[in-house]
Amino acid sequence: MRYKFIIAGVLGILASPALADWQYTRWGMTELEVISASDQTIIPEQNPKMNKRSLKSRLHGTHFGGGVSTRFEFDSYFLFDFSDKLQEVHLELKNGKDCADLAGAIMGIYGPTQADERSPVYSLRKWWDKSNQNLISLFQIGEKCTLSYAAIIKPGTRGL
């Protein structure tokens, strides 16, 4: 009888709709929830920085590949909005020379680039993972290479 409950629980998890998230986090988590979910491997940022979208990097840590490949090592940054809810995760590749290999690994997971913007100075590639409701961006400028995850935000029905 106990095995029936375990099997039913596993099937329930597999059948449940995909949630927008990154690894062990869920969009909208608080700082303490992210730290707890990371098994205390993520720590508070000493000097939080705000990005152009008014999100503040409040937590950071080190991340190894996580589904992409363990050969990639990243500095991870967790960005929160003014209501202290997780909105984005930025992974800065420690060895920027591996950015082309990282792009290949990302394409192996999400398919061909769905948006591609390039200039002599930078490149920005994007993928929309609709099954998990995530926007994945790969930004490279020089040897700085950042992989970002954020929830796909559905536009409102109101407008001009």
Image (tube, helix red, strand yellow):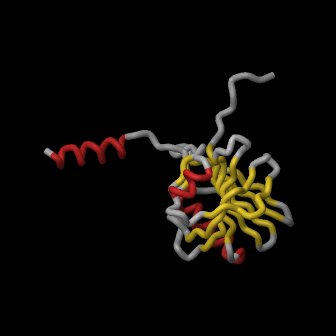
- Using the image, determine if residue 93 lies above or below residue 48: below
50 vs 60, left or right, is right
Point out residue 64 in the picture as x, y percentages from the top left corner: 56, 71
Residue in front for this viewpoint, 8 or 98: 8
Outermost left residue: 1
- Using the image, determine if residue 44 lies above or below residue 7: below
Outermost right residue: 120
Residue in front for this viewpoint, 120 or 99: 99
Tell me the quarter of the image containing the C terminus: top right
Point out residue 69 in the picture as x, y percentages from the top left corner: 53, 71
Residue in front for this viewpoint, 49 or 6: 49
Tell me the quarter of the image containing the N terminus: top left
122 vs 15, left or right, is right
Q: Which residue is located at x 22 percent, y 44 percent?
A: 5
Q: Which residue is located at x 25 percent, y 43 percent?
A: 8
Q: Which residue is located at x 67 percent, y 45 percent?
A: 84
Point out residue 133 in the picture as x, y percentages from the top left corner: 56, 43
Q: Quadrant of residue 48?
A: bottom right
Image mark count: 0
